[in-house]
Amino acid sequence: MDNKSEKIIEEELEHFKAEKERIRQIVGRIGGKATSRNDRLVNILFVALLLILFIIDILHVAGLPVPITTSFTIILAILMVSMKMIWMMHKNAKVSHFQFWMLSSIEFRLNGMSQKINKIEDKIKKTERKLEWNTKTGKYPEQ
């Protein structure tokens, strides 16, 4: 390979590395390792609160003095489940947005590559026409 093609390949590699790092940062903001830790913490807190409400309700049914009534416990549990569902829908929306962004980016790249390929095909066809063998004269056309 000559120096020019090596330089082009190196530039493309640097561009690829920069884009890869940019995507890694975006994925980290949307839902990387820190987010999975937060998800785990929220899930543990949610389950713990539901268990506490369940235990309080069992104690209330057993006749022990508990400051929360059964109906209030049920209302709190329904509120917590509703909040968890809203939180899950929000997380799902973030993931869907990221997937849409990635697919749009891929489509944009494919369209660009398609245009480049079409230009190359046109150049090849022009070159082939210039080099076609003239069957009448037995010569290549003049350039």
Image (cartoon, helix red, strand yellow):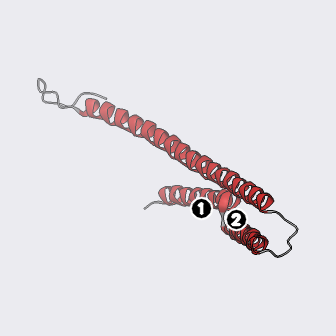
Q: Is residue 33 left or right of residue 1?
A: right
Task: Measure the C-alpha gap from mark 2 to mark 1.
Answer: 24 Å
Front-most of residues 118 and 73: 73
Q: Which mark is residue 35?
A: 2
Q: Residues within 10 Å of mark 2 (few under 14, many from 20)?
A: few
Residue at the image position 46 percent from the left and 43 percent from the top:
110
Decide if residue 133 is on the left or right side of residue 39: left
> Who is closer to the viewer here, 123 or 60?
60
Q: Can you say whether 133 is above or below 78 in the image?
A: above
Residue of label 1: 17
Within 10 Å of disc 1 (Cα), the crowding (few <14, some 14-19, many 20+) is few
Give the x, y percent position of residue 119: 41, 35
Which of these two is toward me, 86 or 58?
58
Amino acid type of the residue that numbered disc 2 sits on in the rendered structure = Thr
Q: Amino acid at mark 1?
A: Lys
**Mark 2 residue element:** helix
| Residue 117 against residue 82 in the figure, above or below | above
Residue farthest front in this picture: 63
Quadrant in the picture for the C terminus: top left
Numbered disc total:
2
Question: What residue sits 40% from the left and 40% below the top?
Answer: 117
Horizontal and vertical percent position of residue 50:
72, 67
Answer left or right for 140 relative to 119: left
The mark closer to the camera, 2 or 1, is 2
Q: Is residue 142 above or below residue 92?
A: above
Secondary element at image label 1: helix
Q: Residue furthest top?
A: 136
